[in-house]
Image: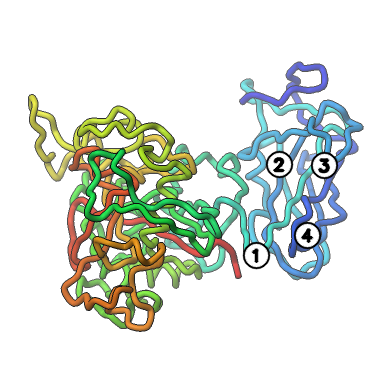
């Protein structure tokens, strides 16, 4: 591990010590309880204790530990720098969660256990050369990342919050819990942002019939899954239908996306593909469905994303003719830029035999068929597999022309069996997005749209989840 430099610019190792440590409170934010009276002390056994106080209202609290070459630096001196979020994430106590109801809050941290150099020795800091930075987040604008336990021992309302990907314990890809026993959620700042949904003729492989451009302004921020839901995560929530996926090779099924699951069994039905219109959005999901059980287990209002939410997150601020990382769409069946971002027909999805491509065997490993989620690069907002791998169900009824609804969920909230245009949907399809392992590059574009009966189960369609961004 590389250490931040001291005032002399040289790395110092051996024993980690603190002396007369400086401490500061978090940045003041509107409608956020004020953080005050921050202290930090280290005992002889090297345990660091941080205390702080909040005003009356509750808040989500995060922590950073910073160092500065100038031990007399002011609180706003740009020389202060974090020692590294993942190192600090091992802190325990009144941190990484919603806190309230105490006069003084306490955080415990063992730097000698988590902050070590390449020789496995602790670092040494000059007197007054470190400080704790405690930040309070408002309940309607919680931190950028949320980790939700879905293991067998999970309890409601125990989610943890972290201010950036760098703070995630163990690292987003190296710690497999984010793809097996927890859901990793990324906050999308969408409220009031006007953007262009759909594609133009510059994307020459587009489907002109259902990708017309239109302006959309979303009304709320939201969290969305960093990964599609995996087979392990499905099994933890819906044990009455274990291992439904087609690609279930025992060696790597755990972190492959779950597929072969219908819209209805995800949201509207209890372990069945049969529709129950009483649970159509905006009603809550059926308590026996995957989402219903997930809500009960976590206490969080999980749901499927709307088409607009899905496309906004997949684009990650990159517009027409761009993949979600900002690289250019090549408008060819094989796209070297997409090769880096997701599984599709011609980068491992199908098996190549000369100039033709064939579907792989059901028992194939993750080098063919679906890939282990997170195998490819993320988009600009840190989301994986938004291009290719599996289509992802969305909330909406499908309609070819959605230009007139301004990004709203395509369900009439007063008559959920209808679309917003008033057409009955007794034989209609639900929308899905993102492309699949078995198709050419063009179907993996952010604007590409697909549709399937809500009863349909297929080896090329799965989902990711969303929820409200905030605790109120």
Q: CA distance from mark 4 to mark 2?
A: 17 Å
Q: Residues within 10 Å of mark 4 (few under 14, many from 20)?
A: some
Q: Residue 465 placed where, x, y %?
A: 40, 59
Q: Residue 15 placed where, x, y %?
A: 76, 27
Q: Label 3 belongs to which residue?
A: 42
Q: To which quarter of the image does residue 146 belong? A: bottom right
Q: Secondary structure at mark 1?
A: loop
**Residue 214 in sight from this viewpoint:** yes
Q: Label 1 belongs to which residue?
A: 139
Q: Decide: marks 3, 1 in contact (CB < 8 A)?
A: no
Q: Label 2 belongs to which residue?
A: 110
Q: To which quarter of the image does residue 359 belong? A: top left
Q: Decide: marks 4, 2 in contact (CB < 8 A)?
A: no
Give the colour scheme of this rendering: rainbow
Viewer-side label of 3, 4: 4
Q: Tag on residue 344? A: none
Does residue 227 lie above or below 129 as drawn? Answer: below
Q: Residue 355 placed where, x, y %?
A: 8, 26
At 52% from the left and 39% from the top, the residue drawn is: 171
Q: Secondary structure at mark 3?
A: strand
Q: CA distance from mark 3 to mark 4?
A: 16 Å
Q: Secondary structure at mark 4?
A: strand
């Amino acid at each position: 591990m590389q250490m931040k430099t001291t005032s002399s610019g040289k790395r110092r190792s051996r024993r980690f010590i603190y002396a007369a440590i400086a401490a500061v409170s978090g940045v003041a934010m509107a409608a956020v309880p004020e953080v005050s009276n921050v202290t930090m002390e280290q005992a002889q056994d090297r345990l660091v204790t941080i205390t702080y106080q909040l005003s009356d209202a509750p808040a989500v609290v995060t922590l950073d530990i910073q160092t500065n070459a100038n031990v007399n630096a002011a609180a706003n001196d740009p020389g202060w720098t974090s020692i590294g979020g993942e190192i600090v994430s091992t802190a325990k106590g009144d941190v990484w969660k919603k806190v309230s109801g105490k006069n003084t809050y306490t955080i415990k941290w063992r730097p000698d256990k988590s902050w070590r150099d390449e020789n496995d020795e602790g670092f040494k800091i000059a007197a007054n050369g470190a400080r704790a930075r405690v930040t309070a987040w408002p309940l309607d604008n919680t931190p950028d990342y949320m980790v939700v336990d879905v293991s067998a021992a999970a309890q409601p309302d125990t989610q943890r919050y972290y201010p950036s990907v760098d703070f995630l314990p163990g690292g987003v890809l190296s710690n497999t819990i984010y793809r097996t026993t927890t859901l990793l959620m990324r906050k999308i700042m969408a409220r009031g942002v006007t953007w262009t949904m759909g594609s133009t003729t510059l994307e020459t492989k587009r489907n002109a019939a259902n990708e017309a451009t239109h302006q959309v302004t979303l009304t709320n921020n939201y969290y969305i899954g960093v990964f599609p839901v995996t087979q392990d995560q499905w099994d933890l929530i819906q044990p009455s239908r274990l291992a439904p996926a087609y690609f279930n090779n025992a060696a790597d099924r755990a972190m492959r996306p779950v597929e072969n699951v219908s819209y209805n069994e995800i949201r509207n039905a209890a372990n069945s593909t049969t529709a129950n219109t009483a649970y159509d959005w905006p009603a809550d999901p059926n308590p026996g469905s995957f989402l219903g059980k997930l809500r009960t287990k976590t206490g969080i209002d999980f749901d499927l994303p709307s088409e607009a939410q899905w496309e906004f997150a997949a684009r990650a601020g990159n517009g027409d003719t761009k993949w979600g990382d900002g690289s250019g769409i090549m408008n060819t069946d094989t796209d070297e830029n997409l090769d880096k971002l997701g599984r599709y027909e011609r980068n491992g999805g199908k098996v190549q035999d000369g100039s033709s491509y064939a579907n792989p065997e059901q028992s194939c490993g993750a080098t063919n068929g679906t890939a282990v989620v997170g195998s490819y690069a993320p988009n600009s907002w840190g989301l994986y597999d938004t291009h290719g791998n599996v289509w992802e169900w969305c909330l909406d009824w499908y309609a070819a022309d959605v230009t007139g609804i301004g990004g709203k969920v395509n369900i009439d909230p007063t008559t959920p069996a209808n679309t917003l245009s008033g057409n009955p949907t007794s034989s209609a399809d639900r929308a899905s997005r993102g492309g699949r392992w078995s198709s050419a590059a063009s179907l993996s574009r952010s604007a590409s749209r697909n549709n399937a009966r809500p009863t349909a189960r297929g080896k090329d369609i799965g989902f990711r989840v969303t929820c409200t961004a905030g605790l109120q």
